[in-house]
Amino acid sequence: MLSSHTINKAGKREEDSEQRGCSSFKKKKVEYDQFVRNEIDCFQSEENGSVYFSSFNPVWPILGCGLSDGKVLIIEGKRQADLVSTWENKSWNKVNAMSAMTDLGWNMDGSLLLVAFLDGQIVLWNKNTKTSMEIKDPNGEQVWAITWNPSLPTTFATRSDQTVLVWDRAHNQPKAPKQRFTFHSSLLRDLVWISDDQFFSCSDDGLILLCQIGTESPIRSFDHGDAVLSLSWNNTLNLLGCLSLNGSTMVWSMDKNEPIYLVKSERMKRPTCLAWYLFGDSIAESSWTLIACTAD
């Protein structure tokens, strides 16, 4: 199920966007016969594996696939409209994995592909040089997820049960994380960068913490009161959306100590994630729309 609402500038919900007369998105007619199904036979080697993770390169027509046996498959197409028909296996990158793969993703300029494993190992593949290097936190922190910094192409964060590690200068083969953040007392659920050196993290402890590289303690905290599952940052309005385990959605402003918006849906039995919709013909039309999703 997908629940949605729009938040106006007074922090109140508007249920029907068409009544506002500014929903150009709904006015666009979608021809569903434009969607074409394509199946790609990627596995042309005897060393096959199930695809556990996949990530499109944000710049080039490349798909990175993380396989169940620890390998990474790079599938690349030509720069043209019909990409899928040109795709072919470009390389198998053997990863000396000793544990399960947990995440995979490209940096913002599409030059680096990062693969993370449960035992703390990180493998960084360089698209330009076709080489890879293995990195491992000497403390052996588990890695559940990776988040690239949207502004700095060689800075990323990995998160484990209760710890965030920030890595920098990936092209210089870092031997240890740049900084370790261990501020939460329960399971870490999500992390979102809001600038070059700041990120928010959330946890089952109900806290949302704003952390800054180079600072040894959180510089800001919000107390949700319940486990926080997902975060979404609105860079246009400098607002933070958060979704909790009890099905409530909050919006926090950086200049206030209390949420500017709070709603709880009885239909959100198993909330999963949320995201801002930041596209449209005008800021007033689109940037206040926040989507909350549930598995039910």
Image (cartoon, rainbow, N blue to C red):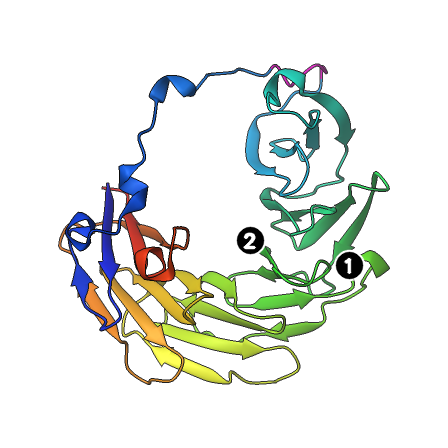
Q: Quadrant of the C terminus?
A: top left
Tell me the residue at 55%/53% (across/down): 145
Give the x, y percent position of residue 65.
62, 33
Relative to 104, is 266 above or below?
Answer: below
> Is the residue under label 1 in contact with that under label 2 (CB below 8 Å)?
no
Q: Quadrant of the N terminus?
A: top left
Which span of residues is magenta-colored?
Answer: 41-46
Q: Which mark is residue 244?
A: none
Relative depth, front residue between 204 and 139: 204
Relative depth, front residue between 53 and 281: 281
Q: Is residue 226 left or right of residue 266?
A: right
Q: Which quadrant holds residue 92?
A: top right
- Which of the two discs, 2 and 1, sits closer to the camera? 1
Label 2: state its secondary structure: strand
Relative to 256, is 155 above or below?
Answer: above
Relative depth, front residue between 115 and 29: 29
